[in-house]
Image (spheres, rainbow, N blue to C red):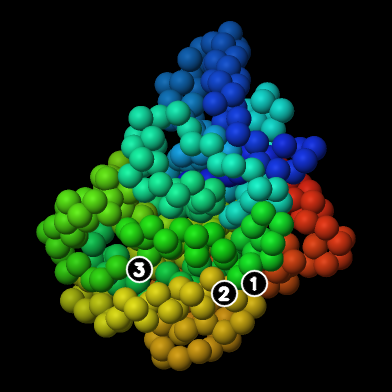
Amino acid sequence: MRKVGIEEELLLVDPETRELAGVSHRVIAGHHALEAERLRESDHSPGTAGRDRAVHPEKTLAVDQEIFLQQLETATTPCTSVSDLEADLRRCRRLAAEAAHTAGAAVVAVGTPVVGDTQAVVTPNQRYQRIVDEFGSLIRDVVVSGMHVHVDVEDDQEGVAVIDRIRPWLPVLLALSANSPYVHGLDTGFASWRSQMWGRWPSAGPTEPYGDAAGYHAVAEAMIASGASMDRGMLYYDARLSEMWPTVEIRVADVCTEPSDALLIAALARALVETAAHEWRTDEPPARWRTDLLRAANWRAARYGVAGQLVHPQTRDLKPARFVVEGLMAYAADALEDVGDKDLVKDGFHRLLARGAGASRQRAVAEARGSLTAVVDDLLARTNAT
């Protein structure tokens, strides 16, 4: 069974003004202090001296800074079961929330800043400063938060085979996650404005098929040589090979406020990877899709989320979003069944529709309560209900 993990980008906000708070340096200092205290308590507990450090050394790395001082990044450990992944996702959010509290801030899982127009402050870091120097206002305007799903692959060859085959399905994951209709007090008209802002990067978005690992690495080197990416960490494709782990990293989603939505997308992502790997092993070629048409499908997903029609990856015409998502579940049914995720995904999708997907929920709260600060309050309450 392939392991799966989630990275979340979270915004830091002032609980009073609900605007962005550029305090991640203080948050990380608070996180380290809290972790040190937890380790001291563990060392002094009978029979548990150093146990948490020895068994789970990665747990002190669950919260880290991002490119802006108004953001944090969290990362779960790799998990085999979705129930374990849920527990670890909630643990990471608790750690982030506790650390933010030490700096007088709060964390919120939302794709874009809902209110305020705070100037983005880049984290003092040599690499980040190089990005600013090279890309200018392209980076200064992009205080957005996504969710990245990592799924195990055997090697780069399998990973590239997977990336080539999941391309047409990634807009469906974007639609499910769409959680950024507002930015700085304005309704953008989109369900996912984050994806539109992020898509301005020259290395972002859908890609051409690579054919094999050699093709992937040749393109990566050419992108860096062109200056469109400083290094492989700046290859912001919708799906890429991770530079740190033996995984395919699916980067298309907005960060989800509801953990259950994040888990739905993670389970579908793992099933897509397994289905694509099986097709590769049985010599089934990737579906032929033009990249410009995939960009159109991405735009459709960002514009409407699951509240409208989406491009169906198999029929290639517009279908109701529910029909398209059910098509994804059918396409990956064997993989979902093999790991016991079929009912979890089905129930999670029905809950998402009944509750309202991220963007729809934000607009419903704004309409019912008459203000965007109320939207932030609702986001804060749900982010921190862990």
In the rendered image, is residue 82 in sight? no
Q: Earlier in the sequence, mark 1 or mark 3?
A: 1
Is residue 262 in view? yes
Placement of the N terminus among the 4 image quadrants:
bottom left
Which mark is first along the chain, 1 or 2? 1
- Kind of residue sitting beneath label 1: Gly
Distance in Å between CA atoms under marks 2 and 1: 7 Å
Q: Residues within 10 Å of mark 3 (few under 14, many from 20)?
A: many
Mark 1, secondary structure of its residue: loop
Q: Residue placed at 36% from the left, 48% from the top?
A: 135
Marks 1 and 3, how far apart at CA: 22 Å
Element on which disc 2 rests: helix
Circle 3: residue type: Pro
Q: Quick one: which residue is furthest to the top in this view? A: 44
Badge 1: few (under 14), some or many (20 or more) residues near its Cα, within 10 Å? few
Horizontal relation, residue 172 to residue 3: left or right? right
Q: Identify the image quadrant of the C terminus.
A: top right
Front-most of residues 332 and 169: 169
Q: Are marks 1 and 3 in contact (CB under 8 Å)?
A: no
Q: Which residue is mark 1?
A: 189
Label 2 neighbour load within 10 Å: few <14, some 14-19, many 20+: many
Residue type at mark 2?
A: Arg
Whether pointer 3 and pointer 2 mark residues with C-beta atoms closer than 8 Å, the reply is no
Reply above or below: 103 against 289.
above
Q: CA distance from mark 3 to mark 2?
A: 17 Å
Q: Nearer the viewer, mark 1 or mark 3?
A: 1
Residue located beneath label 2 in the image: 303
Q: Which residue is mark 3?
A: 206
Disc 2 vs disc 1: which is toward the camera?
1
